[in-house]
Image (tube, helix red, strand yellow):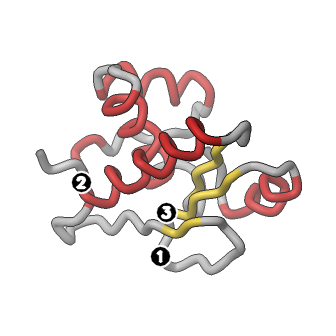
Amino acid sequence: VTSRDGVLQALEDGHFVINTAKEILNKAHVKIPVEINTGLVLHQLTDIANVMEKVLATSDQKVVVHCAMGMERSVLGIVWYLATKQGMTLQRALELVQEHRPIAQDRLNWIKL
């Protein structure tokens, strides 16, 4: 997880970058905006998790997911991946992300199941 400021370094380091911020244009490999209150968040998070799973299964690249500040949308994308692809509960996945990125916010209420 990173903010927009970490993207250039992630790309230079050879990582696969996913942009979850509609308002940010950069050289991320994939752009999958997480758009709150559109009814599309679950679909968008699933797309992010699927891309992460594919990249991790087919390459040696690390995956970096970013939004503007690396606190909400990107965090939610990682949490969804950990829950749906790695079998964690949403709460445990969030706690794990917060252990590594203390500024990560709890936006689980954005997921409409």
Classify mark 3: residues with Cα within 10 Å, few (<14), some (14-19) or many (20+): many
Q: CA distance from mark 3 to mark 2?
A: 13 Å
Measured from the top left, where is residue 16 in percent x and y?
Answer: 68, 53
* Quadrant in which the N terminus is drawn: top right
Residue at mark 3: 20
**Type of amino acid under label 1:** Lys
- In the rendered image, residue 73, in percent from the top left (x then y), is placed at 44, 55
How many residues crowd mark 1 within 10 Å: few (<14), some (14–19), many (20+)?
A: few
- Label 2's element? helix
Say which residue label 2 marks: 42
Nearest to viewer (mark 2 / mark 1): 2
Q: Residue furthest left?
A: 113
Dot 1 lies on which element?
loop
The answer to whether 81 appears left or right of 8 in the picture is left
- Mark positioned earlier in the residue sequence (2 or 1): 1
Residue 101: x percent and y percent?
61, 33
Residue of label 1:
22
Q: Quadrant of residue 80?
A: top left
